[in-house]
Image (cartoon, grey):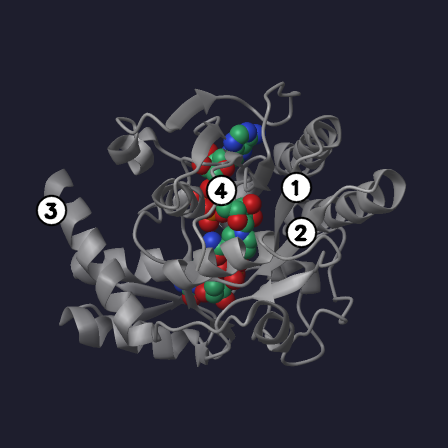
Amino acid sequence: MHEPVAKRILVTGGAGFLGSHLCERLLAAGHDVLAVDNYFTGRRSNVAHLLDNPRFELMRHDVCFPLYVEVDEIYNLACPASPIHYQHDPVQTTKVSVMGAINMLGLAKRTRAKVFQTSTSEVYGDPTVHPQNEAYRGNVNPIGPRACYDEGKRCAETLFFDYRRQHGLNVKVARIFNTYGPRMHPNDGRVVSNFIVQALRNEAITVYGDGRQTRSFCYVDDLIEGFVRLMATPDAVTGPVNLGNPAEFTILDLAEAVINLTGSRSRIVHRPLPEDDPMQRKPDIARAREWLDWTPQVKLEEGLKRTVAYFEGLLGRDA
Ligand code: NAD
Ligand code: UDP
């Protein structure tokens, strides 16, 4: 392997869960990293350990407004990601997805930077094909409570491909499936963090619906490896590329795995299934395997152990 050339890389949403891991990874590779974030769901503490690094810079900025910086690559992550957060202010969620994409694409156009969009499996909605491959066009309810996020991300993809066609930009689009790991926000409402926090506190584990809906959970380190590989592909490779772990579990399986790993006294309780909650989700990653030579390495049990250790530290400190 030859030494990578140091680049100036912008990470929007850099103080969030995935953004903080990405910044860490890019700094370790010797790049200059500018993280921008408005701290809506992210926290400075996620990147506090990077602040002493002279190659790292953190800026408070809302991507709904233009940004004038000089960079070689842009990873666009800024957007609330958990259903509770993105439904809190749905109009703002659509704005962040669409205006954030326009602003980052405009920046890429001016600087001729490569630009990477963190799209989502939510573009497939409540899928009618299983597993989901990139050719599937999805089953999204355009007027439901998840639409602000799903349609916002779909429109962002449209913008990425139109900027490519119209302005010749070098774009990369990843469709990310449920990813978990250290630095998830303890209150962000996503299932892995909810279950672990509930289990560590011996509180009821809240399974929505009958718990037979499925998800496929990718450990954060695997996902970040996929990001870096996709960004490094030749100009002709734009995606979209599914990135996720194809091992599929029911939500009840997950609840039981978390209870076993933590030795918790928690009981499972059932709560109503949220509207438009997808019943099945599993990525077809043939494209990522072929184009990126990428396959997730971390099994659910191992990833959960590392995540539990993180939350034990966090909750212990809060106590
Ligand atoms: P996160 O909520 O931890 O991170 C999002 C970050 O964006 C936060 O730091 C937040 O403060 C910031 N942000 C929000 N609005 C902003 C704005 N207007 N300007 C600047 N910063 C803003 O969530 P995450 O899991 O790290 O998700 C990162 C990206 O990956 C999101 O775009 C999300 O849609 C996408 N994604 C994540 C998953 C997953 O499972 N984690 C799955 C699919 C897609
Ligand atoms: N879920 C649950 N209990 C919780 C949180 C979530 O049963 O405390 C379910 C939710 O209804 C969904 C799945 O877990 O079926 C994944 O939810 P999450 O919010 O993590 O992500 P989604 O894939 O729905 O965006």
Name the residue rendered at 44%, 33% in the picture.
33
Residue 56, image x and y in percent? 38, 29
- Image quarter hosting the C terminus: top left
- Image quarter hosting the N terminus: bottom left
Front of the two marks 3 and 1: 1
Q: Which residue is mark 1?
A: 114
Front of the two marks 4 and 1: 4
Q: Which residue is mark 3?
A: 316
The disc labelled 2 sits on which kind of residue?
A: Lys
Please tell me whether mark 4 sits on a helix, a strand or a loop: loop
Q: Which residue is mark 4?
A: 5
Front of the two marks 1 and 2: 1
The disc labelled 1 sits on which kind of residue?
A: Lys
Looking at the image, residue 285 sits to the left or right of residue 254; the answer is: right
Q: Which residue is mark 2?
A: 172
Please tell me whether mark 2 sits on a helix, a strand or a loop: strand
Neighbor class of circle 3 (other Cα within 10 Å; few <14, some 14-19, many 20+) is: few
Front of the two marks 3 and 4: 4
Residue 126 vs 310, above or below: the answer is below
Q: Is mark 2 within 8 Å of ligand 1?
A: no
Disc 2/disc 4 C-alpha distance (Å): 20 Å
Return the residue nearer the eye: 131 or 116.
116
The disc labelled 3 sits on which kind of residue?
A: Gly
